[in-house]
Amino acid sequence: MNTANLQLEGLYLAIAAINNALVEKGILTRDEVGLALRRAEQTALGDYRNESLSGAEQDAVAFAPRLLFLANNSAADGQTPAFSELAKLVGQTKPPHPDRL
């Protein structure tokens, strides 16, 4: 596996832990974190370049906010899934692309 991918996995898990700490300290609610992540996903997907990106490339752009959103929801249930489980959930829960309907 590419070392950069492993570094990104660690970064995503670190950001998820920070998000959870913000919620636990009462700085943000879990819903506020979720809303911010959904907005990040929409911003990424609404980027001007997306007209030239394939569906797979758009999924790649949206992967981080989607994974962090799922991690945020899992933390609400008191769970801390492994990165591989979160990545699997991203693939299972992503919305279909309009060109694939």
Image (cartoon, rainbow, N blue to C red):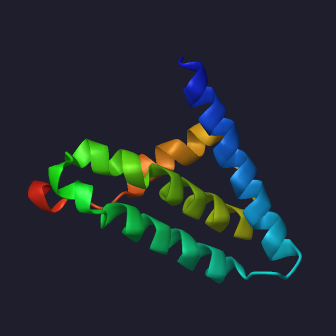
Q: Residue at left 79%, top 75%?
A: 23
Image quadrant where one finds the C terminus: bottom left
Image quadrant where one finds the N terminus: top right
Tell me if residue 31 comes above or below residue 59 in the rendering: below
Please identify the quarter of the rendering in which residue 82 is found: top right
Q: Is residue 37 left or right of residue 41?
A: right
Q: Residue at left 69%, top 77%?
A: 30
Q: Is residue 80 visible?
A: no
Q: Residue at left 85%, top 82%?
A: 26
Measured as percent of width and height from the top left, residue 32 is found at: 64, 82
Please identify the quarter of the rendering in which residue 51 is found: bottom left
Tell me if residue 23 comes above or below residue 80 in the rendering: below
Q: Is residue 34 left or right of residue 49?
A: right
Residue 47 or 84: which is nearer the viewer? 47
Q: Residue at left 24%, top 56%?
A: 50
Please identify the quarter of the rendering in which residue 25 is found: bottom right
